[in-house]
Amino acid sequence: MHLQDAGLSTLRRCMKLASQRLAILVSCFLPAMNHPALADEVKFFDGGIDYWAAPAPKVVDQPTLKVEQKKPSEPSSFDWQRVMDPKNDDFFREGDYVPPAAFMEVARDPSDQNIRMWNAYIEKKNNLAARLQQRLQEYAASNAPMAPPGVVQAQTPRQQSTATSEADTKRYQFRMYFDSQCPHCKRMMQTLAELSEKGFFVEARQIDRLPFDSRGLPFAISAAAPDEVKRHAIASVPFLLVGDLKDKIVYKMAGYKSVSDIFGEIENGVKR
């Protein structure tokens, strides 16, 4: 009975102590809650935000792509200083063609030594071209096509005359005077190449002094002396001389000629 009274007494004291502390807390916070400046600020649940729910996913700002504005293309300027300088190969360039380095060297520095080396270079090229031409003649003479036995091909008189003249490679020799800038002269080079392949002696002499690419041509090319041009009265190019070693005649032909044109004029006795 005494224990029960003691427990009730202890419980009453605890409840009284708790009520006292609660009164103290209320007295501390109640003036602040009633203050007009803070009454509108302390609103935890009026803003529509649920502070007790799971946190919202973090929104990551996407980077903005920068679009570069294209600048108007500026017209490219031509480099005149480069082509005006003989030290640069572009000074000598003609389209995709660049003259031999030896020519550019002697043109840049026409010293006595360079001129001697240039003449030696041209002479060596001519010797190689002459050797090639001789070998082509020997090859054409030893490997001439022969008709099968019993087969006779009908030919017109013009064809017979042309065939006979073309076969006589030791009778005729050809020399053409040309200008490196003449388009008809360049076409005529093919005619001379055909004559050379048939075994005739062929050579070409250049009137002007500009660079000329003779690679691939099976005959010699050299510079024409001024007295030659005067002696033959060459007024236009291409100008062809055909020497008939048998009849001791020189045929002179001006303008572009094919192989058949040349032997046709020989047959008609065109000479000057």
Image (cartoon, helix red, strand yellow):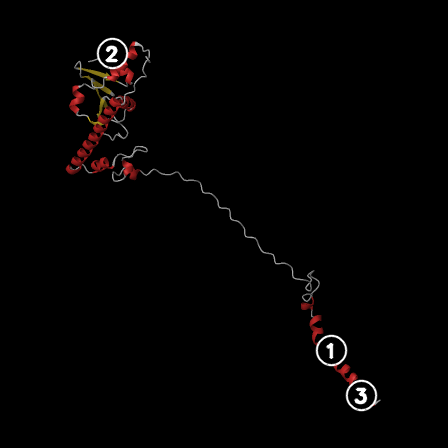
Question: Which of marks 2 and 3 precedes in the sequence?
Answer: 3
Residue type of the residue flagged with mark 2: Glu
> Badge 2, how many Cα within 10 Å: few under 14, some, many 20+?
few
Which numbered marker is on residue 267?
Answer: 2
Residue depicted at x 18% and y 22%: 229
From the image, which quarter does the C terminus lie in? Answer: top left
Residue 255 on image: x %, y %? 26, 18
Question: Which of marks 1 and 3 precedes in the sequence?
Answer: 3
Residue with the mark numbered 3: 6
Question: Which of marks 1 and 2 precedes in the sequence?
Answer: 1
**Please, what secondary structure does the residue beneath circle 2 have?**
helix
Write down the quadrant of residue 265 in the picture.
top left
Gap in Å between the C-alphas at discs 3 and 2?
161 Å
**Please, what secondary structure does the residue beneath circle 3 have?**
helix
Residue depicted at x 31% and y 10%: 156
Give the farthest residue toward the right.
1
Of circles 3 and 1, the one toward us is: 3
Which numbered marker is on residue 22?
Answer: 1
Of circles 2 and 1, the one toward us is: 2
**Please, what secondary structure does the residue beneath circle 1 have?**
helix
